[in-house]
Image (cartoon, helix red, strand yellow):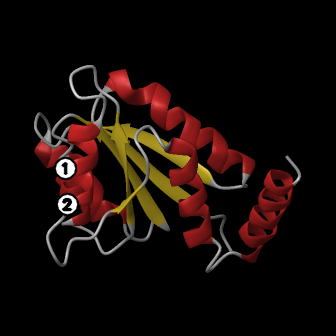
Amino acid sequence: MASPRVGIIVGSKSDLAVVEKAQEQLKELGIDSDITVASAHRTPKKVEKYAREAEGKYVCLIAAAGMAAALPGCVAAQTTLPVIGIPIKSKALEGMDALLAIVQMPPGVPVATVAIDGAKNAAILAAQIAALKYSEVTAKLKGLKAKLAAQ
């Protein structure tokens, strides 16, 4: 069986530092990932193509954006894969704008939402989704939970 893979999409290059933390956590859990930069507002056709081509490549997607934060919802609207949204902290409203934009999705277009800049939890949630199909990820998650309990 192939290794699990998670797709990460971020709205701006300036937000790469946040999603790179998710990528690091996924790697620790034995999950491959890649990062794509695409904006729901500036490059909507690229976002649409990404979402439509994600099925069959990934077990789930992580979508991160700040301010108006339409990206996670736009991705979720165009795929049946689970989408995890990361609201990115901004100077103006400390990320509350992004949090509210991501969490307030209409019925039928769910986005699982983590804390502002919550990349590590997004990765762990993605791993928990992957663990439904990949038992080796379950073992890694159990190790992570034991490590957290020992702190």
Q: Is residue 140 left or right of residue 7?
A: right
Residue at the location (17% across, 47% down)?
Answer: 70
Residue at the location (81% across, 69% down)?
Answer: 139
What residue did someone put label 1 on?
Answer: 101
Contact (CB < 8 A) between labels 1 and 2? yes
The amino acid beneath tag 2 is Gln
Pick the residue in front: 73 or 5.
73
Task: Point out the image quarter for the N terminus.
Answer: bottom right
Q: Is residue 99 above or below residue 18?
A: below
Pick the residue in front: 148 or 40.
148
Q: Secondary structure at mark 1?
A: helix
What residue did someone put label 2 on?
Answer: 104
On the image, the x and y values in percent for residue 116 come to: 40, 41
Pick the residue in front: 87 or 149.
149
Residue at the location (15% across, 39% down)?
Answer: 68
Q: Is residue 147 left or right of residue 2?
A: right
The reply to whether residue 38 is visible in this rendering is no
On the image, the x and y values in percent for residue 143 come to: 84, 60
Asked which quadrant contains residue 127, the reply is bottom right
Q: Residues within 10 Å of mark 1 (few under 14, many from 20)?
A: many
